[in-house]
């Protein structure tokens, strides 16, 4: 196979698992501990904003206690070394890809390290806890929400992602169950012209990929990048 010129990589919670962050749908994962209807929908935030803030405050605090693993670092190394087009699209709201050295990176479900003001729409860097009393650093109104994408909301950077998917030669999916759209449909879109590869603890099902390798991300991703 000739070397691909243009690569799109999609990552999910599985790549951060070995850093100590829970996935969503594995046994003992996030959705075993809280109901997504209580914390990850616009309705949940309207009903009980401080409950939702508390959920994201806890996850933001957890980020300070974890480090990028060998899989994040391998993708950072790929970013530095790869002279062709490369786009890393992550569904994760942690910052482990940035800390692992990735720069050509889009967070399609937002990030824990930012808040968005429902009053003035400013997106501001954020490292601390927030609640319904916290003033927006830009306009001063107490109308902050986590800058993340909940069910029923439109993911971020979709135009850039669709453009990259439509021209890439290789699409790689790492550590995602492929159950949440639109990310779950990326393999089909890219697969119109690109080779498709899945690196996951276990095949995500559906047989959508040309090749699927099973194992932990910290083993598979460095091997893929080498
Ligand atoms: C390892 C490993 C190791 C473990 N190594 N691997 C019916 C009703 C309502 C809505 C819908 C509906 N049908 C479709 C929808 C749309 C909905 C959707 O997809 N729902 C499905 C559940 C059916 N989607 C949306 O609402 C999205 N918006 C949308 O579609 O807008 C319309 C639109 C789109 C495009 C253009 C214009 C308009 C928004 C989805 C937002 C998802 N938000 C969340 C929360 C974000 C903030 C947060 O983190 O709290 O995003 S939900 C959660 O799931 C989070 C994740 O990013 C996302 C995906 O999860 P992920 O990463 O795949 O994790 P897991 O746990 O599922 O899988 C982990 C995998 O890793 C497993 O396979 C393991 O085996 C593996 N693994 N350890 C390698 N060591």
Image: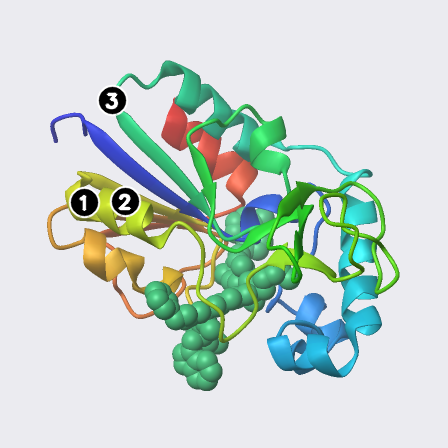
Residue denoted by label 2: 171
> Tag 3 or tag 2, which sits nearer the N-term?
3
Q: Whole-percent x and y of residue 143? A: 74, 62
> Tag 1 or tag 3, which sits nearer the N-term?
3
Q: Tell me if mark 1 has few (under 14), some (14-19) or many (20+) residues whose alpha carbon lies within 10 angstroms of its own.
A: some
Residue depicted at x 35% and y 36%? 87
Between disc 3 and disc 1, the foreground one is 3
Query: Is 63 rendered above or below residue 177?
Result: above
Residue denoted by label 1: 195
Taking the image as shown, residue 131 lies to the left or right of residue 179, namely right
Quarter of the N terminus within the rendering: top left
**Which quarter of the figure has residue 96?**
top right
Let me know if residue 181 appears in the view: no
Query: Is 191 rendered above or below residue 32?
Result: above
Q: Whole-percent x and y of residue 203? A: 40, 60
In the depicted view, which residue is nearer to us: 147 or 80? 147
Taking the image as shown, residue 173 lies to the left or right of residue 103, namely left
**Which quarter of the figure has residue 19?**
top right
Circles 3 and 1: CB atoms closer than 8 Å? no
Residue depicted at x 25% and y 42%? 164
Circles 2 and 1: CB atoms closer than 8 Å? yes
Quarter of the C terminus within the rendering: top left
> Tag 1 or tag 2, which sits nearer the N-term?
2
Query: Is 85 rendered above or below residue 187?
Result: above
Let me know if residue 89 appears in the view: yes
In the depicted view, which residue is nearer to us: 169 or 150? 150
Residue depicted at x 76% and y 43%? 63
Q: Tell me if mark 2 has few (under 14), some (14-19) or many (20+) residues whose alpha carbon lies within 10 angstroms of its own.
A: many
Between disc 2 and disc 3, the foreground one is 3
Q: Whole-percent x and y of residue 222? A: 47, 29
Mark identifier at residue 84: 3
Q: Secondary structure at mark 2?
A: strand
């Amino acid at each position: 196979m000739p070397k691909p010129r243009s690569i799109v990589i999609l990552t999910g919670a599985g790549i951060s698992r070995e850093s100590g962050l829970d996935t969503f749908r594995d046994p003992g994962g996030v959705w075993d501990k809280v109901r997504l209807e209580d914390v990850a929908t616009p309705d949940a935030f309207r009903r009980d904003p401080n409950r939702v803030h508390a959920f994201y405050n806890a996850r933001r605090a957890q980020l300070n206690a974890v480090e990028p693993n060998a899989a994040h670092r391998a993708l950072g190394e790929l970013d530095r070394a790869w002279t062709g087009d490369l786009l890393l699209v992550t569904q994760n709201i942690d910052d482990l890809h940035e800390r692992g050295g990735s720069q050509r990176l889009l967070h399609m479900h937002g990030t824990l390290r930012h808040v968005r003001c429902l009053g003035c729409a400013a997106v501001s860097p954020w490292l601390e806890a927030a609640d319904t009393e916290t003033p927006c650093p830009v306009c001063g109104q107490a109308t902050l929400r986590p800058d993340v994408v909940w069910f029923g909301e439109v993911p971020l950077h979709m135009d850039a992602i669709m453009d990259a998917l439509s021209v890439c030669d290789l699409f790689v999916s790492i550590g995602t169950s492929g159950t949440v759209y639109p990310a779950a449909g990326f393999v089909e879109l890219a697969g119109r012209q690109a080779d498709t590869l899945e690196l996951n603890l276990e095949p995500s099902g559906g047989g959508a990929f040309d090749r699927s390798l099973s194992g932990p991300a910290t083993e598979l991703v460095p091997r893929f990048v080498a």
